[in-house]
Image (tube, rainbow, N blue to C red):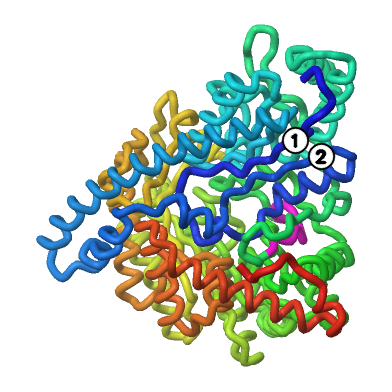
């Protein structure tokens, strides 16, 4: 760190050797925002984001892929139980072999990346951490950098740090972690690095100075170690949403052209006992609509992207209605998805809400997702503090579907449900009763011709910072002492039967983890038998429709083939889908520009 030459910061999007989700390859706005903030402050930035389908394809190419591809239908759609058991055993062996191949390739990939850090004299390495194996590889990469490029300062941030706070640093080799957001803190650290380096200082001097500032309360959002090695946290200070920079997207980054827009931050309700969002986002903020429209325009013009996902935890109809007004007034032709909460008193406000949703659909809304959690009002109130009733969910979904029908434009509505979930002690409510009530709500929606397009089902989980985690006994959870450190690195092995997953050693009211997974899978089976598609989120619905998959059959086909690609690492289907999405996104963007503007290069080939 004694030279001022080299790269000021490298931003790495952590990677585990294969795709985790269809949306892995979407535009990365978190790194984009940090990149913009650092560039605007005069620092050189290098982005290493391996999340693109071309890289995945070359990385995972091996002779096991075709075998897994052939075995897939016998495992997931077997003709007999005997065939399923035999095929599953073979499948698990092949998956273990595949993991060993990927592990070996990851060693080579990380070694090459460390060499790049050393060769480019990277002063600060910023790592965006994700769950499971991606966090484990983040730790491995950080340790390799510390050993082979000892003057590079290593800082971690991202979803795992935001959720797990001090736990993310306690047993990890990172020098520091940045919590929640880093636009200000990271620039402050880069400035210190530059100043100390110019005076011939070392990394140890930088760490000492940052620690002094942290203990003096002069740096925010930082996780650091004190003189005794104890992890401490400085106060969190969030930028007003209106002051956040727009993301900087690299040209020819081979990403999928669906961009994230921060139209709001956090949840305007923010009281659910199971939800970790308030712990991450803080109080609810709505961005000025004019700024949201300006970012959409900039993205259309600079990148040729016409597909968007609004990032707010729960965009209220009041805000989405104002955004829709602005989109329609400006004559913008875009398509987007968003996450919402069920409205309250919907039955009384039905006409008003349908009219609002009609306008929002006209503005380009094509998919929404909302948390229903359960169809039992007592559980919703006493266990979840959801702030909604089953009636609210029913009439909100009905209003959304009615608006879609009135506008003759399909709107995908996805809902999430938690099963099994805690039940109130002494209430007499059983898990069997909860299951039947959940299924009855879905039957009622189908009968009224306002059936959701997707149902996502997960077992209850006490996430960090939630009431469920802080008071586990009150809600019936039994958690081990090392719960946070285990979950921090826990990999949900989607390619394997849940019965083979590593045990979390948690229980819910006497139900162990494996049985919780089985109960969740049983509800999923029942929901499938009712004709519902399961486990497709709003942004995945947006992707499917943009790629030409129509109707329920189309969504089911998209889900099945996407799962096949992810579980076998045969990415031919996803590669084709991403090409179609990018072509569709570009076509939408072109509708907003003059012929002269469409001649501007948006980064070369479509994908």
Image location (x, y in percent) of residue 82:
10, 61
Quadrant in the picture for residue 248: bottom right
Mark 1: give few (<14), some (14-19) or many (20+) Cα within 10 Å.
Answer: many
Look at mark 1 in the image and give the residue it sits on. 9
Residue reaching furthest to the left: 82
Image location (x, y in percent) of residue 331:
84, 83
Dot 2 and dot 1 residues touching (CB under 8 Å): yes
What residue is at 68 percent from the left and 71 percent from the top? Answer: 307
Residue 50 left/right relative to 28: left
Look at mark 2 in the image and give the residue it sits on. 44
Q: Can see residue 65?
A: yes
In primary-sequence order, the first of circles 2 and 1 is 1
Q: Is residue 247 above or below residue 258?
A: above
**Label 1's element?**
strand
**Label 2's element?**
loop
Residues in magenta, as a range: 259-268
Residue 215 left/right relative to 507: right
Image location (x, y in percent) of residue 95:
29, 48
Residue 430 left/right relative to 150: left
Pick the front one: 192 or 458: 192
Image location (x, y in percent) of residue 314:
67, 60
Quarter of the image containing the C terminus?
bottom right
Quadrant in the picture for residue 143: top right
Residue reaching furthest to the top: 228
Question: Is-magenta flag for residue 404?
Answer: no
What residue is at 58 percent from the left and 22 percent from the top? Answer: 173
What residue is at 76 percent from the left and 80 percent from the top? Answer: 590
Residue 154 left/right relative to 553: right
Task: Give how far apart the Cα atoms at labels 2 and 1 are.
Answer: 7 Å
């Amino acid at each position: 760190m004694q030279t001022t030459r080299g790269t000021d910061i490298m931003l790495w999007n952590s990677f585990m050797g294969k795709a985790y989700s269809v949306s892995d390859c979407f535009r990365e706005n978190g790194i984009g925002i940090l990149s913009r903030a650092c560039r605007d402050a005069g620092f050189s930035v290098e982005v290493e984001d391996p999340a693109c389908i071309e890289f995945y394809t070359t990385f995972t190419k091996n002779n096991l892929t075709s075998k897994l591809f052939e075995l897939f239908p016998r495992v997931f759609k077997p003709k007999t139980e005997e065939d399923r058991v035999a095929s599953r055993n073979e499948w698990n062996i092949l998956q273990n072999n595949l993991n060993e191949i990927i592990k070996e390739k990851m060693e080579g990939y990380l070694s090459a990346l460390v060499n790049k850090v050393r060769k480019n004299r990277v002063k600060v390495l910023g790592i965006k951490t994700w769950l499971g194996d991606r966090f484990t590889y983040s730790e491995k990469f950080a340790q390799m950098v510390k050993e082979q490029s000892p003057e590079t300062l290593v800082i971690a941030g991202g979803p795992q740090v935001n959720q797990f706070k001090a736990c993310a640093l306690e047993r990890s080799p990172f020098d520091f972690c940045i919590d929640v957001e880093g636009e200000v803190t990271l620039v402050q650290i880069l400035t210190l690095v530059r100043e100390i380096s110019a005076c011939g200082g070392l990394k140890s001097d930088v760490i000492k100075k940052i620690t002094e500032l942290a203990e003096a309360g002069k740096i925010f959002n930082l996780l650091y170690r004190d003189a005794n090695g104890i992890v401490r946290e400085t106060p969190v200070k969030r930028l007003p949403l209106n002051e956040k920079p727009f993301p900087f997207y690299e040209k020819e980054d081979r990403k999928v052209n669906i961009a994230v827009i921060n139209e709001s931050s956090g949840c305007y309700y923010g009281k659910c006992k199971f939800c970790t969002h308030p712990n991450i986002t803080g109080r609810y903020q709505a961005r000025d609509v004019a700024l949201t429209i300006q970012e959409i325009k900039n993205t259309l013009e600079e990148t040729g992207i016409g597909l968007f996902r609004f990032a707010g935890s729960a965009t209220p109809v009041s805000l989405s209605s104002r955004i829709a007004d602005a989109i329609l007034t400006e004559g913008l032709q875009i398509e987007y998805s968003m996450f919402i909460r069920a409205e309250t008193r919907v039955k009384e406000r039905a006409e008003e809400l349908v009219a609002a949703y009609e306008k929002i659909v006209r503005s380009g809304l094509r998919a929404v997702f909302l948390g229903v959690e359960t169809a039992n009002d007592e559980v919703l109130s006493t266990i979840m503090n959801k702030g909604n009733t089953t009636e609210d969910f029913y009439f909100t979904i009905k209003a959304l579907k009615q608006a879609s029908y009135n506008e003759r434009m399909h709107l995908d509505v996805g809902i999430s449900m938690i099963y099994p979930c805690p039940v109130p002690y002494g209430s007499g409510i059983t898990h069997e009763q909860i299951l039947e009530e959940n299924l009855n709500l879905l039957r009622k929606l189908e009968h009224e011709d306002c059936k959701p397009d997707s149902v996502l089902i997960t077992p209850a989980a006490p996430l960090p910072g939630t009431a469920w985690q802080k008071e586990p006994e009150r809600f019936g959870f039994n958690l081990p002492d090392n719960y946070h450190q285990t979950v921090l690195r826990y990999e949900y092995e989607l390619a394997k039967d849940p019965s083979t997953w590593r045990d979390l050693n948690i229980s819910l009211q006497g139900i162990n983890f494996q049985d919780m997974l089985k109960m969740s899978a049983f509800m999923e089976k029942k929901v499938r038998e009712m004709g519902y598609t399961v486990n497709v989120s709003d942004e995945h619905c947006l992707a499917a429709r943009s790629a030409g998959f129509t109707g329920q059959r189309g969504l089911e086909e998209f889900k099945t083939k996407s799962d096949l690609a992810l579980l076998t690492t045969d990415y031919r289907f996803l590669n084709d889908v991403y090409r179609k999405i990018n072509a569709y996104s570009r076509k939408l963007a072109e509708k907003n520009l003059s012929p002269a503007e469409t001649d501007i290069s948006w980064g070369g080939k479509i994908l």
